[in-house]
Amino acid sequence: RVLLMDEPLSNLDAKMRLQMRDVILDLVREAGITTVFVTHDQEEALAMSDRIAIMDHGNIAQLGTPEELYGTPVNAYVADFIGSANVIPVPARTGLAGAPDGHVRYELCGLGFDGVRGSAQLDASGVLIARPEELALMSPAPYVPNTLPGKVLRRQYLGFKTAYRIALDNGSEIRVELHAGNMVAQFQPGEAVQVLIPADSRVVNA
């Protein structure tokens, strides 16, 4: 037996949706019945699911646990659909001499970066997946590996985090989120900064 729930919370206000999520989870687990829950709400899908199927034009783009879909998306579509992500086209190379397995070298704003191959067979034209909360901001300094220069366009203080929009030298933008307690979250619009992209950021196929 399978219980199908097709967007059952779509007509509720935000507070009631949160309450009903817990009620539904308690009921289906008590009943021990497999439930297919259809939703367009990303947070709802992450919070309520043991496994999630991301659909793309009628096909399953990726099937996995919430942690797998958020942390290891197989392509740019899944990464951009689940959570917030900077999705940036980058030239990429794999199989470099002396590099560890799964390592990828990509270019951004004319600089070389180290990353992780996120697709089994990576095209030469890859896509960098950089979650805003995984990036860091630094004051301008002598070159640090895996950093690129930029300028703060906008700063939004949101209590538990500070959200930044950073203009890069090639005219594009990148979003960075620094969470409460991060003592460097004091950059103001117009200031020059360096954006640190972790070396475990994934490069996938478009």
Image (cartoon, grey):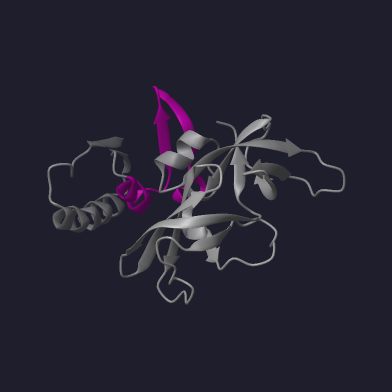
**What's the residue at 58%, 56% (across, down)?**
149
As rendered, which of 157 and 189 lies closer to the eye? 189
Residue 197 position within the rendered picture, expressed as x and y whole percent measured from the top left: 59, 55
Residue 24 position within the rendered picture, expressed as x and y whole percent measured from the top left: 23, 51
**What's the residue at 62%, 34% (across, down)?**
126
Residue 145 position within the rendered picture, expressed as x and y whole percent measured from the top left: 70, 59
Compared across the picture, whether 1 is left or right of 18 comes to right
Q: In which quadrant of the rendered view does residue 3 lie?
A: top left
Query: In the rendered view of the protein, which quadrant contains the N terminus?
Result: top left
As rendered, which of 60 and 95 lies closer to the eye? 95
Compared across the picture, whether 80 is left or right of 94 comes to left
Q: Is 57 above or below relative to 63?
A: above
Q: Which residues are magenta?
A: 42-69
What residue occupies the far right of the structure in this picture? 97
As rendered, which of 105 and 50 lies closer to the eye? 105
Query: In the rendered view of the protein, which quadrant contains the C terminus?
Result: top right
The answer, for residue 67, to whether it is visible in the render is no
Residue 35 position within the rendered picture, expressed as x and y whole percent measured from the top left: 31, 41
**What's the residue at 27%, 53% (across, down)?**
25
Compared across the picture, whether 35 is left or right of 194 comes to left
Q: In which quadrant of the rendered view does residue 14 lie?
A: bottom left
As for residue 151 lying within the magenta part, the answer is no
Q: Is 135 above or below relative to 82?
A: below
As rendered, which of 150 and 92 lies closer to the eye? 150
What residue occupies the far front of the structure in this picture? 190
